[in-house]
Image (cartoon, rainbow, N blue to C red):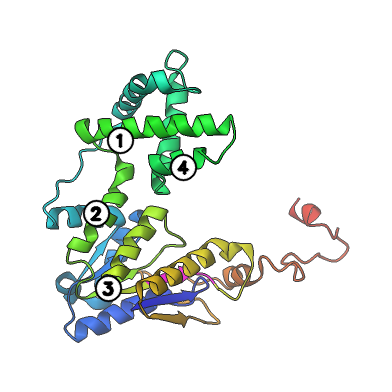
Amino acid sequence: MLTLVIGRAGTGKTEFVMSEMRRRMGEGEAGMFLIVPEQYSHYAERQLCAVCGDKAALHAETLSFTRLYSNVMAETAMTSIDVLDASGQILALYRALESTAPWLKVYGVKKMRTEILENLLDTIKEFKSLNITAQSLEHISSKASNPTADKLKDIALILDAYNAILHVHGGDAADRMTLLAEYIGDSTVGSSGHVFFDGFNDFTVQELCVIKELLLKKASITVCLTCDPDDSNEIFEVPNRTFKQLKRFADESGVKVERIFMERDEPSPCLADEPLPCLPCLAIFNTKLYLSETPLIKSAPNSSTSFGSNCE
C-alpha cells in the first residue's frame, strides 16, 4: 500500500510518521526504514530515538538515498562504484570528446576550453538526474531541427563515450540512484517492514524510479509531502505534481493508495530535545502569503499605502 500524508507546514506530518513507527515497533514489526534528505538524516535519527527509545536501533534505520544505495549494493553483493573526482571526470570527458571528434558537428576538441568542459559536464549530470540516456537524446534529435538537432546528436555521442570510459576507469556519482533503482528489487528493502519518506517536497527522476521499483515489489510505503492538492497556489506546484506522479505510479503498479490530509490550526510542537517556539506570524505567512486580496502588511495611519514605502 502507498500512504500519502499531505498537509501544509506544521500540521504534524513528521509527528504522524514518528508515532506510526513507534506503534509498529510496539507490535514487534522490524525492518522499517525512514528515508530523509541528506542534510536532515542526523536530526531525523535523533528524533526517532527520542520518540521510540531503544527499540529504534533494533527495528528501524534512518537513511538518506545515498546511504540506502550503499546498503543495497552491499546486500546484493554488488561493488559500489569508485567515483572519480571533479578533475578525473573532466579528463574522462575530454577523452570522450577526442574519441568522438570525427563525428561531432558542434563540439570541437581544439576549441574546447576548461569552462566549456565544465558546462558540458554539468549538462551531462543534469541529463543523468533526469534519467535521460544517450538513446533518448538520439531519438529527440531526429525530431528536432538544426542547430538543436546537431547539438543533441553530439551530446548523445559524447555521453555514450563518456559512460564507456567510466565503466572502465571509474564511476560517476550521478549514476548511483540509477544503480539503486536497478538493484533495490533484489534487496530486502520493502520485502518486510515499512518504508517511510519524510522531509521531501519533490524527488528527482532517479529517486522516483527507486520508489516505483519499491511499488512494483508491493512494498508498504508512506510518503509525506508538504502540499495541498486543493490549493492551486504556486507554492505547492512542485509537491502537488509529485503527489500526482506517485499516485500514478501506484495505479500502474496495482497498489492501493490511501491519502491522509493533516490539518491543524496551530503548528505542531517540534520534536527536538529543546522545542523551538512556534511563532503565530509564521502560520499567517504559511496560509496567507499568496492571497493577494488579504495584504499581510497593513498601512499605519497617515503612511503611504504602497508596500515599497512601508518596507523603506
The circle drawn on residue 163 is 1
The reply to whether residue 47 is in sight is: no
| Quarter assignment of residue 64 | bottom left
Between discs 1 and 2, the one toward the N terminus? 2
Q: Is residue 224 shown in magenta?
A: yes
Identify the residue at the far bottom of this view. Answer: 27
Between discs 1 and 4, the one toward the N terminus? 4
Q: Is 103 in front, or is 279?
A: 103
What residue is shown with label 4? Answer: 139
Between discs 3 and 4, the one toward the N terminus? 4
Q: Dot 2 lies on which element? A: helix
What whole-number distance in Å separates the C-alpha atoms at marks 4 and 2? 30 Å
Between discs 3 and 2, the one toward the N terminus? 2
Q: Is 113 in front, or is 103?
A: 103
Query: What's under tag 4, amino acid-wise?
Result: His
What whole-number distance in Å separates the C-alpha atoms at marks 3 and 2? 17 Å
Q: Dot 4 lies on which element? A: helix
Query: What's under tag 3, amino acid-wise?
Result: Ala
